[in-house]
Image (cartoon, grey):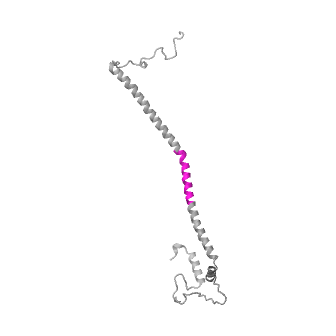
């Protein structure tokens, strides 16, 4: 075998014909003198306009990303601010209600400093009387008005132990077997 003549089994020093590039199928166009300059001018203008449009798109996308980042960054802060403002307004309302309550309590305290008011409250609430006065208390003013033979709703004529016994028997029967 000759040295350097073989590159291995199945290899050949030349490429096969199928892998060679094929010659162009069509012939090159002949340039028209006026059109060549116009095509060259239009070509670089189109590329320049395309680059400008691409820059605008990139700027818009970049601006959108920045705005989205700011919204994500600022949204929780704004939500906390609005929550705190609503809490502050609720607390102001509560303080206003408490001021009204304090004013009512102060006016009641001022009434209690008046000896005539204290005397009136002692007579009505505690049934106090002055020395020498007689006090009459009506225990049940409606006794004469109602008929003793007719029982009102909620009142039972049975003794208390019968009521307890019947409630114990009712508790032993399941709800679906009651009549």
Residue 115, given in percent of the width and then of the height, sits at 64, 79
Q: Of residues 138 and 158, which is closer to you in this image?
A: 138
73 to 14, vertically: above or below: below
Q: Residue at x 33, y 21 (%)?
A: 35
Q: Residue furthest right?
A: 131
Q: Residue 65 vs residue 36: left or right?
A: right
**Residue 133, image x and y in percent?**
64, 89
Residue 113 placement: quadrant: bottom right
Q: Please, is residue 107 above or below residue 43 in the view? A: below
Is 82 inside the magenta-drawn segment? yes
Residue interval drawn in magenta? 71-90
Please tell me which residue lies in front, 155 or 64.
64
Q: Is residue 108 above or below residue 52?
A: below
Q: Is residue 75 left or right of residue 46?
A: right
Q: Nearer the viewer, residue 120 or 5?
A: 120
Q: Residue at x 50, y 42 (%)?
A: 67
Picture quadrant of residue 102: bottom right
Count all numbered tags in the image, as a single digit: 0
Q: Main secondary structure of the magenta part?
A: helix
Residue displayed at 54% across by 50% down:
78
Residue 104 is inside the magenta segment? no
- Identity of the residue drawn at 55% across and 55% down: 85
Tell me if residue 133 comes above or below residue 111 in the rendering: below
Residue 59, percent from left and from top: 47, 36
Question: Residue 159 location, x and y as percent?
Answer: 59, 85
Corner quadrant of residue 42: top left
Question: Which residue is the extreme one toward the top?
Answer: 2
């Amino acid at each position: 075998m000759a040295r350097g003549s073989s590159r291995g089994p199945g290899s050949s020093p030349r490429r096969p014909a199928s892998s060679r590039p094929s010659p162009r199928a069509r012939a090159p166009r002949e340039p028209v003198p006026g059109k060549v300059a116009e095509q060259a001018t239009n070509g670089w203008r189109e590329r320049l306009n395309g680059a400008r449009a691409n820059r605008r798109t990139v700027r818009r996308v970049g601006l959108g990303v920045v705005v989205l980042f700011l919204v994500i960054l600022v949204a929780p802060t704004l939500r906390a601010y609005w929550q705190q403002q609503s809490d502050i307004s609720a607390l102001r309302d509560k303080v206003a209600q408490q001021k009204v309550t304090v004013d009512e309590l102060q006016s009641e305290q001022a009434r209690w400093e008046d000896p005539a008011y204290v005397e009136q409250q002692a007579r009505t609430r505690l049934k106090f009387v002055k020395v020498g006065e007689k006090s009459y208390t009506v225990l049940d003013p409606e006794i004469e008005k109602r008929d003793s033979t007719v029982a009102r709703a909620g009142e039972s004529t049975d003794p208390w132990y019968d009521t307890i016994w019947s409630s114990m028997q009712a508790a032993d029967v399941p709800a679906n077997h009651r009549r």
